Amino acid sequence: MGEEALRLESRIPADTEYLAAVGRTFYNYAYLEGVVISTIGILHIHGSAGIPPKQTARALARLLTRSIADAVPPLSDGHRSRLVRFDATFRATIAVRNTLLHARPFTAVGGAQRLGAGPHTWNEQELADAAERFEAAAIEGNDIFHSVLVPRRDGVR
């Protein structure tokens, strides 16, 4: 299957840059969720087996909170504080992601295709801001995972 076979020539009009921004935003959120799942897996007493499949973001947030609280051995105050901040940041991203996820396509003034819900329209800057917010949270969580949790699991203090 060549590269040409993979191209989709959509009959639905939409700006390529706008679609790329939407895709990047969702990708960054999916990456963030992956970091959350990895964090739960390393903290949870049953590891990754303690994460039921196909959980909503809110269910993952509750499981992350419980995993931080129930970590064995207990987390140091500094590590717990950092994880609690990451947990709060993840929870704050859920509403942003849900607003985008439930947005509907519409034709804006000038004919551009956009996503929106009620009075809220997702323009390129809002998509970039959300993508950066999700990315920053993922990077922070990934840093906690690799600099705190993996060494802790491996017995390096």
Image: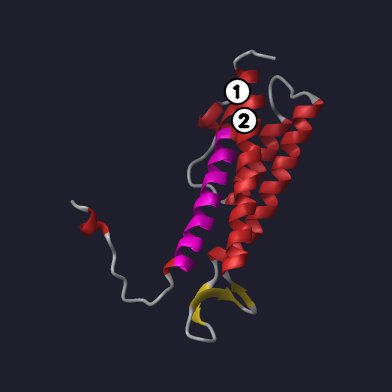
Marks 1 and 2, the one that precedes in the sequence: 2
Helix, strand or loop for the magenta stretch, by majority:
helix
The amino acid type of the residue labelled 2 equals Phe
Residue segment shown in magenta: 17-38
Question: Quadrant of the rendered structure where residue 36 is?
Answer: top right
Q: Quick one: label 2, few (<14), some, or many (20+) residues within 10 Å?
A: many
Q: Position of residue 51 (x, y in %)?
A: 54, 36
The amino acid type of the residue labelled 1 equals Val
Q: Please, is residue 153 above or below residue 30 in the view? A: above
Q: How is the image coloured?
A: secondary structure
Circle 2 SS class: helix
Q: Position of residue 69 (x, y in %)?
A: 73, 32
Q: Position of residue 154 (x, y in %)?
A: 59, 15
Circle 1 SS class: helix
Q: Quick one: label 1, few (<14), some, or many (20+) residues within 10 Å?
A: some
Question: Quadrant of the rendered structure where residue 32 is?
Answer: top right
Q: Position of residue 52 (x, y in %)?
A: 52, 40
Of all residues, the one furthest to the left in this rendering is 1
In the picture of the structure, the residue carrying the numbered disc 2 is 145
Q: Are marks 1 and 2 in contact (CB under 8 Å)?
A: yes
In the picture of the structure, the residue carrying the numbered disc 1 is 150
Name the residue located 65 percent from the left edge and 79 percent from the top edge.
119
Q: Please, is residue 141 above or below residue 59 in the view? A: above
Q: Please, is residue 127 above or below residue 88 in the view? A: below
Name the residue located 65 percent from the left edge and 45 percent from the top edge.
137
- The C terminus appears in which quarter of the rendering? top right
